[in-house]
């Protein structure tokens, strides 16, 4: 069944994106910018694409621009999301004929949004609103430039480059991909704020993970079961699971969809979302006064420190269990000899 119509959404005058940005996003951004050679790679990639105009022409030439007459449903949702965020100018939005579900925000100084046609085919209005609000989060946070770089680097195979060039590019590519994954956590929060519909936001993740047209409506998918799966994945720490999770995500631009569903659920539980809806958020132009950068960096440092401690703790526990199992097996073998 389709989602019921939500309560009227609360407008958030002059809301600043720092109100919802994930601390790991800001930490990874700082780390990415500090990688030697990063600035030079950015300049060369943007130059190769012909700058802002060249990037936009890629989509103007082979996509459909959303207007009141072209994809009016998506256009109306974009206007409504901009109104919720009190964003003065709706960015251009395009629909690309692509059978794989995705969307993105690209550009340099004047970002625009691209929706894959598969997303329009799969989502109902409230889920599509959450997706557009997610992309508006990227626009408002200034993610579009680096997402453009990430998309290019993701398409570049290191094996296709000369050996030394590939080795030199690897740390930059890994840093960009790490930031890209963390930036999605920020944009997911924006999607939640823009839609103000938790079921729509979580069903969006479920459909991205493995949905097909009509599956939810015909009873072939269940959100509660998906959230159980999401929390199982988030809390799986047996043996080398933590290491496998890290290795499985190193080359991805987005976190696992179950991770994103669990993250947004945890953020809702923290009370931060409710505070924003009540009007307790940072206004644009007041970022340094109300939320100094040093506080963000401290929060980011704590996030990564805690995450690192968790990884070390689980790996240590796994090693201790393995050592104890070996000791017990050795003792049994001796006693049985």
Image (tube, rainbow, N blue to C red):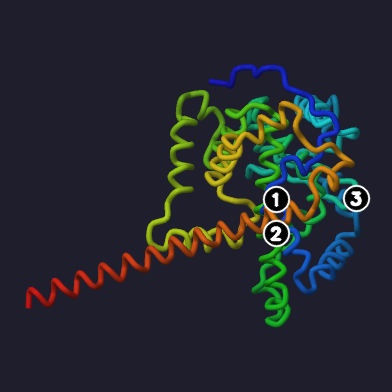
Q: In the image, is residue 88 above or below residue 254? A: above
- Which of discs 2 and 1 lies nearer the camera? The answer is 2
Residue 87 place in picture, x, y as percent = 86, 33
Q: In the image, is residue 286 above or below residue 69? A: below
- Residue occupying the far bottom of the picture: 164
Position of 292 with respect to 223 (left or right) is right
Q: Quadrant of the C terminus?
A: bottom left
Residue with the mark numbered 2: 28
Position of 297 with respect to 234 (left or right) is right
Total residue callouts: 3
The crowding category of the residue bearing disc 3, from other C-alpha atoms within 10 Å (few below 14, some 14 to 19, many at least 20), is few
Mark 2–mark 1 distance (CA, rounded to whole Å):
8 Å
Q: Earlier in the sequence, mark 1 or mark 3?
A: 3
Residue 102 place in picture, x, y as percent = 67, 44
- Visible in this render: residue 316? yes
Q: Which mark is residue 183?
A: 1
Callout 1 secondary element:
helix
Position of 296 with respect to 331 (left or right) is right
Say which quarter of the image contains residue 177.
bottom right
Towards the viewer: 324 or 198: 324
- Which of discs 1 and 3 lies nearer the camera? The answer is 1
């Amino acid at each position: 069944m389709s989602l019921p119509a939500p309560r009227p959404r609360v407008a958030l005058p002059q809301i600043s994106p720092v109100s919802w940005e994930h601390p790991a996003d800001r930490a990874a951004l700082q780390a990415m910018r500090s990688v030697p050679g990063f600035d030079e790679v950015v300049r060369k990639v943007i130059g190769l694409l012909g700058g802002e105009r060249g990037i936009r022409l890629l989509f103007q030439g082979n996509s459909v621009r959303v207007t009141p007459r072209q994809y009016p449903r998506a256009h109306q949702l974009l206007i409504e999301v901009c109104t919720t965020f009190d964003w003065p100018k709706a960015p251009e939005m395009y629909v690309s004929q692509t059978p794989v579900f995705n969307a993105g925000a690209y550009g340099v100084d004047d970002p625009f949004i691209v929706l894959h046609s598969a997303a329009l085919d799969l989502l109902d209005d409230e889920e599509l609103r959450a997706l557009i609000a997610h992309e508006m989060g990227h626009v408002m946070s200034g993610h579009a430039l680096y997402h453009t770089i990430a998309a290019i680097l993701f398409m570049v195979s290191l094996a296709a480059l000369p050996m030394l060039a590939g080795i030199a590019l690897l740390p930059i590519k890994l840093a960009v991909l790490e930031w890209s994954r963390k930036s999605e956590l920020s944009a997911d929060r924006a999607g939640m704020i823009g839609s103000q519909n938790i079921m729509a936001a979580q069903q969006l993740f479920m459909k991205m993970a493995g949905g097909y047209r009509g599956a939810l409506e015909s009873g072939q998918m269940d959100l509660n079961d998906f959230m159980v799966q999401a929390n199982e994945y988030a809390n799986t720490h047996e043996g080398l699971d933590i290491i496998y999770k890290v290795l499985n995500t190193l080359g991805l631009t987005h976190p696992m969809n179950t991770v994103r569903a669990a993250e947004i659920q945890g953020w809702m539980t923290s009370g931060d979302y409710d505070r924003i809806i009540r009007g307790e958020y940072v206004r644009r132009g007041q970022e340094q006064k109300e939320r100094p950068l040093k506080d963000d960096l401290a929060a980011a440092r704590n996030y990564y420190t805690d995450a690192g401690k968790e990884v070390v703790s689980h790996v240590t526990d796994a090693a201790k269990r393995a050592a104890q199992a070996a000791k017990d097996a050795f003792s049994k073998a001796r006693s049985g000899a």
